[in-house]
Image (cartoon, helix red, strand yellow):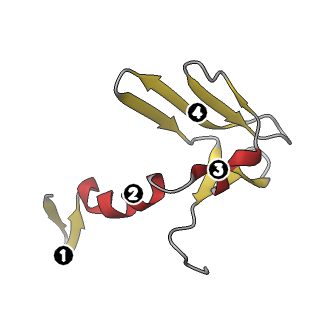
Amino acid sequence: MGEIDDEGVTWLDGNAAAGVLSQVFCGEPSGAVIVCAGCGATAPVGALPAYGLELGAIVRCPHCDTAVLRIGAAGATLWVDLRGAVSLRVRIGDSAS
């Protein structure tokens, strides 16, 4: 993990986020709440319609049909595209917040 000093501010590279990302991507994904970038609707991922499951998945907003989540599989690699979502909220552990 490299450190970059830019005008007195210390920045870490993306590896510093690995611990937090491992919490996000190891939980039960169907209960994660996603906010649509197209219309602002909020719903658990498991309640949204999914299509194209043979090569991955395209998960769409049921209100405006925006593709909020795209997942593609290519061998041992998974691609995740969330550009149709404003946010993805994942509950970790037994946290009440």
Residue linked to disc 3 = 30
Residue linked to disc 2 = 21
Quadrant (top left/top right/bottom left/bottom right) for the C terminus: bottom right
Query: Where does residue 93 sit, x and y in percent of width and height?
Result: 50, 71
Q: Are the two marked residues, 1 and 3, in contact with CB atoms closer than 8 angstroms?
A: no
Figure check: 58 above or below 10: above
What whole-number distance in Å separates the C-alpha atoms at marks 2 and 1? 27 Å
Q: Secondary structure at mark 3?
A: helix
What whole-number distance in Å separates the C-alpha atoms at marks 4 and 1? 39 Å
Amino acid type at image mark 4: Arg
First-in-chain label (1 vs 3): 1
Amino acid type at image mark 2: Leu
Residue linked to disc 4 = 70
Residue at (23, 66) in percent of width and height: 11
First-in-chain label (4 vs 3): 3
What whole-number distance in Å separates the C-alpha atoms at marks 2 and 3? 17 Å
First-in-chain label (4 vs 2): 2
What whole-number distance in Å separates the C-alpha atoms at marks 4 and 3? 14 Å
First-in-chain label (2 vs 3): 2
Nearer to us: label 2 or label 1 = 2
Residue linked to disc 1 = 8
Q: Secondary structure at mark 2?
A: helix
